Image: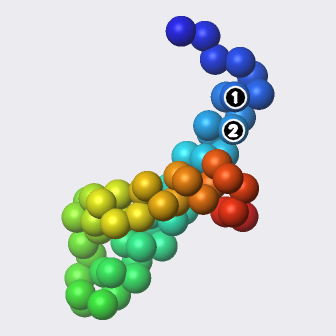
Amino acid sequence: MSVKTGNHSVIKDFIRHQVEEMQKHKWLESEKAGADLGEIAFLDWVDKYYDKFSKAYFSGKVL
């Protein structure tokens, strides 16, 4: 499978934004819990927000 250069940069940008959002979620949830939730917070973000984030990102609604 080949990836065109333009698509590659779009995917890299999407992943970068996704990781930033996951890290924010981990920090917020860990602060609420009073402990580092680690992977649990990342999986929680995926369950709660991945679909909405993806749709918003690819429709141009995510900065």
Three-letter amino acid code of the residue under disc 1: Asn
Residues under numbered marks 2 and 1 in contact, where contact means CB atoms less than 8 Å apart: yes
Left or right of 49? Residue 61 is right
Task: Give the vertical position of 10 relative to 2 (above or below).
Answer: below
Q: Residue at x 34, y 87 (%)?
A: 31
Give percent across and percent down for residue 55.
55, 53
Q: Which residue is drawn at 71% across and 18% down?
A: 4
Give percent across and percent down for residue 38.
27, 65
Dot 2 falls on a residue whose secondary structure is: helix
Q: Residue at x 52, y 59 (%)?
A: 53
The local crowd at label 2, few if under 14, some if 14 to 19, many if 20 or more residues have their Cα within 10 Å, is: few
Q: Which residue is drawn at 30% across and 60% down?
A: 47
Left or right of 18? Residue 28 is left
* Quadrant into which the C terminus falls: bottom right
Q: Is residue 38 visible in this depiction of the protein?
A: no
Dot 1 falls on a residue whose secondary structure is: helix
- Extreme-right residue of the structure: 6
**Quadrant housing residue 20:** bottom right
Give percent across and percent down for residue 9.
71, 34
Q: Circle 2 sits on which residue?
A: 10
**Quadrant housing residue 3:** top right
The local crowd at label 1, few if under 14, some if 14 to 19, many if 20 or more residues have their Cα within 10 Å, is: few
Q: Circle 1 sits on which residue?
A: 7
